[in-house]
RNA sequence: GAUCCCGUAGCUCAGUCGGUAGAGCACUUGACUUUUAAUCAAGGUGUCAUGGGUUCGAGCCCCAUCGGGAUCACCA
């Protein structure tokens, strides 16, 4: 234990000796928030020059002590609650029991440490330097802190000193991070508001929020490596879901007109600043709709989210150097047109050999197992994706890449699918769902062949899903959004760890 | 998984040519009844990520390991 931790444990023991419970059980009645008092305190100056305080004359508030300044028989503290910070002012003669100054001189000045939770009762006033302050008439220990916080200081010009910035420590100890860097709360508040706005809209559309299995006997619905686990009683392997798509579509078969789920997905793949092993997706499926309808819904939903998150209600979001406008409608660009526009290649007429030759020339890494569709995807990823800054629907993909998507109503070899790109990143993937059970079975069989050739991400045959389709699924539009990526976009973050409270980390060396 | 960078006090960081460990804040003691990065006086912080090696001597050079970051690959 460090010197400071030992000192705090000694303070803890001394508090108990003085009859003060460092961890009291009683509730503390909070009647005011720091930020509200600072923002709304009012006073008037009378003719004789004295001040008349107009509000917050009986407040009690609670939070952490984040700074103390001793001034002899006076004592100043900064109290931080969930709304912000406010200064506290205490006087020895008001907090003493007659001539016994133990409480002020020992408890407050010696045994109280930075980071301790306290509850105070008093009245608001303004100091002669103009700071709104609570004049404390009663202060109570609510919880002792036994470890020193990394104190971040701000000077008069707003410069930050000794910021707690080490990403490893910040992510491992989010409780510390959010305590000393309270402005980070905004990221998570915005994330929450984003999800709430989406949920409200989906409810308005009449969709039903549902829950589907996380533990699945067959990992379907996406191309990814799964986490595998084992159920002891059933003595069978189970997979953490890589997608919930096939279950949501079963519910459409079951007769629900529209379902949605905010779902944690798990993919056993690499981690970097845009990938965490578990992440959140929103998927929704609506009967009798198609991918064109979904484009309109997507525009409405994202515009609403942007306006809900911006103080001024605007639909624009700053993402790095780009100002992104979420007001619809967004351009619709076919994948082939997009490639032609950025490379000059006509992939519709090009042969597989033409594409290979292009990739070689453009230094795009390819291998021999790649077919035409995969080559097109590689070219798109290398040459087009980065240019799609403003929200853009990329539509009509080759059938080989999309085993769950309905074939295009008029374009042979393509499917009715779109992906939404914003700031050069994919944020949504949608299609007119394949509901022809015979076609679906064939698509699964093609996936099995890919798997036999060693494709670890190929989908497995899901007999029960095909059986469901055989009973009949109405034409359906379905879409999935990457919630973490959207949160990054709407909060201006470039790393997924910053929008997750507890990003995945390797185990700590040792405590 | 590959490459590069980083790891020194509770926090942020210095540490020269290889010569017995430094600053600010935090902490301890004292002064101060409207201070505010409070100030003033005094005090000591430590397994230099871990384990080896080279050397008379390693925070510094070499090797390995662990953790983090960035770039790349894979992906959402």
Image (cartoon, grey):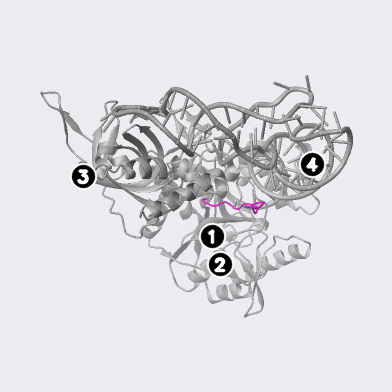
Would residue A225 be visible to someone looking at this image?
yes
Give the residue pinned by disc 4.
A357
Q: Is residue A180 above or below residue A429?
A: above
Magenta range: A501-511
Q: Observer-nearest residue: A399 or A252?
A: A252
First-in-chain label (4 vs 3): 3
- What chain is tagged by disc 3? A
Which residue, as the protein is rendered here, is positioned at the far left?
A: A47
Q: Quadrant of residue A438?
A: bottom right
Badge nearest the viewer, 3 or 1? 3
Give the residue pinned by disc 1.
A264
Q: Observer-nearest residue: A384 or A413?
A: A384
Disc 3 and disc 1: Cα gap in Å?
46 Å
Disc 2 and disc 1: Cα gap in Å?
8 Å
Disc 4 and disc 2: Cα gap in Å?
43 Å
Disc 2 and disc 3: Cα gap in Å?
51 Å
Give the residue pinned by disc 2.
A214
């Amino acid at each position: 234990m460090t010197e400071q931790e030992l000192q705090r444990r000694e303070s803890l023991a001394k508090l108990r000796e003085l009859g003060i419970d460092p961890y009291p059980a009683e509730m503390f009645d909070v009647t005011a928030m720091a930020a509200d008092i600072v923002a709304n305190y009012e006073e008037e100056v009378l003719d004789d020059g004295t001040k008349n305080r107009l509000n917050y004359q009986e407040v009690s508030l609670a939070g952490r002590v984040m700074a103390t300044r001793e001034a002899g028989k006076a004592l100043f503290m900064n109290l931080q609650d969930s709304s912000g910070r406010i200064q506290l002012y205490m006087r020895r003669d008001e907090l003493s029991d007659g001539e016994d100054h133990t409480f002020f001189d020992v408890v407050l000045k010696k045994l109280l440490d930075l980071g301790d939770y306290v509850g105070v009762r008093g009245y608001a006033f303004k100091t002669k330097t103009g700071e709104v302050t609570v004049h404390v008439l009663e202060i109570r220990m609510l919880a002792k802190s036994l470890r020193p916080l990394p104190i971040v200081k701000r000077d008069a010009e707003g410069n930050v000193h000794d910021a707690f910035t080490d990403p490893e420590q910040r992510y491992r100890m989010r409780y510390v991070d959010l305590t000393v860097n309270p402005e980070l709360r905004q990221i998570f508040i915005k994330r929450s508001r984003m999800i709430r706005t989406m949920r409200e809209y989906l409810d308005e559309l009449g969709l039903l929020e549902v829950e589907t299995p996380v533990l699945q006997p067959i990992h379907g619905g996406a191309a990814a490596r799964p986490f595998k686990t084992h159920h002891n009683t059933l003595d069978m392997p189970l997979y953490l879901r890589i997608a919930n798509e096939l279950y949501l579509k079963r519910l459409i078969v079951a007769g629900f007109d529209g379902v949605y789920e905010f779902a944690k997905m798990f993919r056993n793949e690499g981690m970097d600043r845009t990938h965490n092993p578990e992440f959140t997706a929103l998927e929704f499926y609506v009967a009798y709709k198609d991918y064109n309808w979904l484009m309109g819904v997507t525009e409405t939903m994202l515009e609403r989210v942007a306006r809900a998150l911006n103080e001024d209600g605007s639909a624009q979001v700053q993402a790095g150097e780009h100002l992104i406008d979420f007001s619809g409608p967004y351009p619709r660009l076919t994948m082939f047109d997009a490639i032609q526009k950025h490379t000059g290649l006509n992939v519709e007429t090009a042969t597989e050999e033409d594409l290979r030759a292009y990739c070689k020339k453009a230094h795009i890494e390819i291998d021999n197992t790649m077919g035409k569709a995969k080559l097109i995807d590689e070219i798109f990823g290398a040459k087009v994706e980065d240019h799609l800054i403003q929200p853009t629907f990329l539509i009509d993909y080759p059938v080989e890449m999309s085993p769950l998507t309905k074939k295009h109503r008029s374009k042979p070899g393509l499917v009715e699918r779109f992906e939404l790109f914003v700031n050069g990143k994919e944020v949504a993937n949608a299609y007119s769902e394949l509901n022809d059970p015979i076609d679906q079975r064939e698509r699964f069989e093609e996936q099995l062949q890919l798997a036999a050739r060693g494709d670890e991400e190929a989908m497995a045959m899901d007999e029960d899903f095909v059986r469901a389709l055989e009973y009949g699924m109405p034409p359906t539009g379905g879409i999935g959004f990457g919630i973490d990526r959207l949160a990054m976009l709407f909060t201006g973050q470039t790393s997924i760890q910053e929008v997750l409270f507890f990003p995945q980390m390797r185990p700590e060396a040792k405590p």
